[in-house]
Image (cartoon, grey):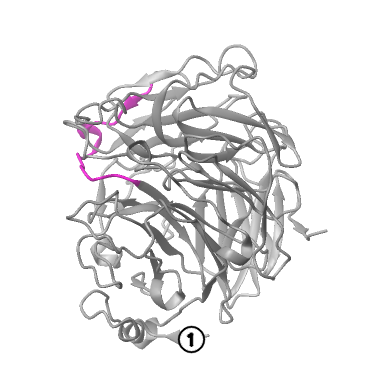
Amino acid sequence: MRVMSLRLAVTALGIAGLAQSVSAENSVAVPSFVEETASAGIDSVYAGEWEYMVGGGAATFDCNGDGFADMLLAGGTAPAKFYRNASSRGGALKFEAEASGLELEAVTGVYPLDVDSDGNTDLVLLRVGENVVMRGLGNCRFERANEAWGFDGGNAWSTAFAATWEKGAAWPTLAIGNYINRLEETSPWGSCTDNWLHRPDAKPNKFAAPLALKPSYCALSMLFTDWNKSGTPSLRISNDREYYEGGQEQLWHVDALHAAAPSTEKEGWKPLRIWGMGIAGYDLDSDGYQEYFLTSMADNKLQTLASAPMDGKPPEATFKDVAYARGVTAHRPYTGGDLRPSTAWHTQFEDVNNDGLVDLFIAKGNVAKMPDFAAKDPNNLLLQGADGKFTESGEAAGVASLAISRGGALADFNMDGLLDLVVVNRWEKAQVWRNTSTNAGHWIEVKLQQSGTNRDAIGAWLEVKQGEKILRREIFVGGGCASGQNGWWHFGLGNMAQAEVRVIWPDGTSDGWQSVNSDNFYILERSKAAQVWAAK
């Protein structure tokens, strides 16, 4: 396995002027990925024309309790396809297609969460037409729950999703983002459909009638996030400026005691207009506040708070773009010979080489045949160096697919402590890569559990202390591009054989720091010591 400086990586790629060289002191370990799509048994295609130019999500979750991440891939006009994970620990990736009840057509996005807190993962299926909530029955079997749970699936073109548990609620709040009026194909501009907020009903285990979020601007990604550490998550919405009129990116106040309302310029929220497609969040600088990466068409942003909070007051909702300074503009292809601007979709922060520095994956692909944008648009794998800057390593790592990509997920499919990759492609088979790196650092993977409602602790903060440095990630359902995950949360530890972990639970309480040994899976349950998990 190669360990090369960013300067050497640029030379290897042969792309002068599109990557940033740095000193040898900032060298990074380039991971190695091997595509195993055919041998893994993956043959899913995201199909469809006009109404399926967006979407194409992937969901990873464990639905049979064996610890291995199973997978659902949206199919568009084809049925969604469920794959049970049949991989062995540390071995080649292997999936088996099974009938699960999830095989609906017209699916654009897929998101796992335990809605009824019964210990079985449920799924929300976004569709062209009626959205459907599928109740998990155990052993990877699912049934429609719209009627039983009072969920109104509507009849829109749904493209974004996020979920949270508001304070004191026994039932989650679901946000669903909708796109343009699909009946206006010849003249769709300005036809953005209202987004919906599905809150708990007064009746137990039911959703109330959906509330329209006005104004709505053709959402393609949503994320409930406690961006200011107030204890109350807000709803970030990334919108596609191709179709709205007078719109912008949005940050909504969502409080169980009040009606939802968008943030204003008086609160520091500045108008930003991009072709908003995906959102990823992570505390990159260990200051306790998240940075947000927003994908677009040749206009990707990395946002950080413009100023630190003062005098104990929460920060203003003012963000600045540091994408150029950190090397993550990713605005043009770096291989393939097409230098027209890129089109970015799913994005995710994860440590793919386990060096303790969070990296960034971006799925790329032309909307259809837009001539002003690259037709050959490789996926990005941007590795973070010790100085906080990122360098492109997608080709060197082996994931620079030129397929028309959409959704995806980084997940440890074979439970070896290395994150693998699945990407959904439009009109072509989804692709799966196994991480075969031999020079990666130590790691831990953590699963959260609490009794009662919100079993998976959505809205918690999971922290890992490496000496004086603290890695922080917010546990959320949403973001990305039409794709969601539930299960193990991964942290690279570099050369550290031990670390400390802490959970700040959704209600703001914490059980304090606990010491853990690297290269293990841990269950962190409220008010209990960390438990090592081992596959049966």
Region rendered in magenta: 260-277
**Nearest the camera: 307 or 263?**
263
Q: Quadrant of residue 8?
A: bottom left
Q: Position of residue 135 (x, y in %)?
A: 66, 30
**Nearest the camera: 171 or 240?**
240
Above or below, comparing residue 373 to residue 78 in the picture: below
**Label 1 crowd (10 A; few <14 / some 14-19 / many >=20):** some
Asked if the stretch drawn in magenta spans residue 50, the answer is: no
Q: Which residue sits furthest top?
A: 203
The answer to whether residue 247 of the structure is visible from this angle is: yes
The answer to whether residue 385 of the structure is visible from this angle is: no
What's under tag 1, amino acid-wise? Answer: Arg
The residue singled out by tag 1 in the image is 2
Name the residue rendered at 17%, 55% in the picture. 372
Q: Position of residue 261 (x, y in %)?
A: 33, 24
Q: Is residue 283 left or right of residue 325?
A: right
